[in-house]
Image (tube, rainbow, N blue to C red):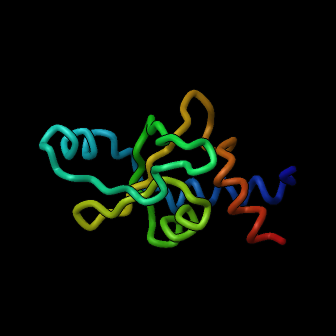
């Protein structure tokens, strides 16, 4: 459960630590046969690779936090990239971001 104050903190993370959508950048990398080795792409529990729906360019701080959450990340051309495995719902409802907030406010 996330409180109203925690929700505000989450909004601040989204607004300050997620810079922009990076789908075009990553699409170009994939189409150019650039070898991409994302961290945490393989889900050992499920014994399968995670499916990424969106890419975001993010801060160094959020990159480290998402790595701790075992989210797909990569540094590409000097940019921190998060591969979001969900879509169709708000970033405010993203479980890995909520987990980061919960760990910080405890």
Q: Residue at x 68, y 62 (%)?
A: 100
Q: Give the percent coordinates (x, y) of residue 14.
A: 57, 54
| Vertical order, 101 against 72 (above or below) | below
Seen from this angle, which residue lies furthest left? Answer: 32
Q: Give the percent coordinates (x, y) of residue 20.
A: 40, 49
User: How many numbered marks appear?
Assistant: 0
Is residue 89 left or right of 23 when viewed as pictured? right
Q: Give the percent coordinates (x, y) of residue 78.
A: 26, 67
Is residue 74 left or right of 95 when viewed as pictured? left
Q: Residue at x 55, y 43 (%)?
A: 47
Judging depth in this view, the residue of 92 and 45 nearest the camera is: 45
Q: Give the percent coordinates (x, y) of residue 17.
A: 51, 62
Residue 10 lies in what quarter of the image? bottom right
Seen from this angle, which residue lies furthest top? Answer: 88
Q: Residue at x 43, y 60 (%)?
A: 39
Is residue 57 left or right of 10 when viewed as pictured? left
Residue 86 lies in what quarter of the image? top right
Quadrant housing the C terminus? bottom right
Judging depth in this view, the residue of 102 and 21 nearest the camera is: 102
């Amino acid at each position: 459960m996330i409180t109203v104050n925690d929700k505000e903190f989450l909004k601040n993370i989204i607004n300050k630590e997620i810079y922009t959508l990076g789908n075009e950048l990553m699409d170009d990398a994939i189409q150019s046969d650039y070898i991409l080795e994302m961290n945490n792409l393989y889900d050992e529990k499920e014994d399968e690779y995670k499916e990424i729906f969106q890419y975001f360019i993010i801060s160094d701080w959020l990159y480290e936090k998402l790595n701790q959450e075992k989210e797909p990340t990569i540094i590409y051309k000097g940019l921190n990239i998060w591969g979001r495995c969900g879509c169709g719902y708000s970033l405010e409802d993203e479980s890995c971001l909520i987990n980061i907030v919960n760990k910080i406010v405890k």
